[in-house]
Amino acid sequence: MRIATWNVNSLKARQEAVENWLQRAAPDILLMQETKLGDADAPVMAFGMAGYQLLHHGEGRWNGVAIAARDGLKVDDIVTNFGDGPVRDSGPGGTAGSEDDFDPFDEARMLAATVDGLRIVTVYAPNGRVVGSPFYEGKLKWFERLGRYLDDERAAGRGNQLLVGGDFNVAPTDKDVWDPDAAHGGTHVSEPERAAVRALIDRGLTDTYRARHDEPGRFTWWDYRAGMFHKNFGMRIDLLLAGSDVAGRLVDAEIDRQARKGPPVPSDHAPLTIDLDEPGKPFDADWEGALSRIAKRTR
């Protein structure tokens, strides 16, 4: 089984790229973040034509999370927003104001479902904007709520089958940042944020990519600006954290750097994949070639 996570940065804008990638990598389960759609606008038919069931939890213009599961996989026990109730409507004519009206618990940032016996949780953590700001404090509180949800899942006997994936908006270590000195003092790399992610992992989860790869310089996000992708100035902020039974089945993990390229216009994130039990469909992420070319250009 292949499972992937990808912040698509607008599913409407990236639908063609996602459909192309489904053919390229053939995941059995794809977790998506930042779909930027309301549930009524989710492309259920398009995914159905591609052979996938689509679960979507959205609010409109911002945020939004989804799970696409290959047809034939059993899907049940769906939970949105930690089970805490509905979120705002940020679509046209909705009740939400601006993005500055920030309440992470009133935003579409979490969706869970049991898929083929795995407890899948897709998350889109708040950005945090500026260390010490209300957005930053809200981010840390949101991580605390995620931790309590995982505690409930473990208490219900599902901890070993957990797979928590998505855009965490945190680079767990200095190895996950292109230049720790340049990023120092900002969000995504502050110690409280990193401690929040460590607290999740300490609940019996494994960072699956790091379980297979120890190399620096492998990232999942690059800013659109200033040629950051072509310089490989990025961060590894998209993670797949696995409970013990899932981690025990891990045979491979990869970040598909090629999917960060266009056309069509790409997301600023690349998909992260893991394979359980046996390798999935081969694809060339081109890390060695890309890093070699970058090294030659920057001598």
Image (cartoon, rainbow, N blue to C red):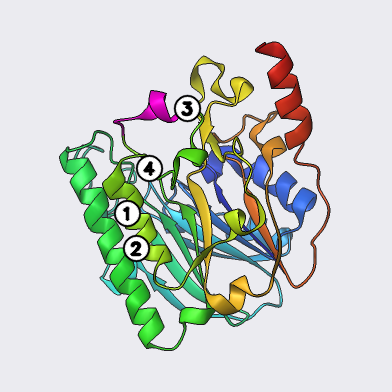
Q: Which of the marked residues, 1 or 3, is nearer the chain's N terminus?
A: 3
Residue 138 is left or right of residue 111, and the answer is left
Q: Label 2 sits on what residue type?
A: Ala
Residue range (magenta): 180-186
Q: Label 1 sits on what residue type?
A: Ala
> Marks 1/3: CA distance?
20 Å
> Marks 3/2: CA distance?
24 Å
> Marks 3/4: CA distance?
32 Å
Q: Residue 184 lies in magenta, yes or no?
A: yes
State whether residue 191 is above or below residue 239.
above
Q: Which of the marked residues, 2 or 4, is nearer the chain's N terminus?
A: 4
**Outermost right residue:** 282
Under circle 3, the secondary element is loop
Residue at label 3? 179
Under circle 2, the secondary element is helix
Q: How many numbered markers are drawn? A: 4
Q: Residues within 10 Å of mark 4 (few under 14, many from 20)?
A: some
Residues 263 and 43: in front is: 263
- Front position among marks 3 and 4: 3
Residues 233 and 86: in front is: 233
Pick the quarter of the image with the N terminus.
bottom right
Q: Which of the marked residues, 3 or 2, is nearer the chain's N terminus?
A: 3
Residue at label 2? 199
Residue at label 4? 61
Mark seen at residue 111: none
Pick the quarter of the image with the C terminus.
top right
**Proximity of marks 4 and 1: CB atoms separated by less than 8 Å:** no
> Marks 1/2: CA distance?
6 Å
In percent of width and height, residue 97 lies at 20, 41
> Marks 4/1: CA distance?
30 Å
Q: Residue at x 23, y 46 (%)?
A: 96
In percent of width and height, residue 277 lies at 75, 73
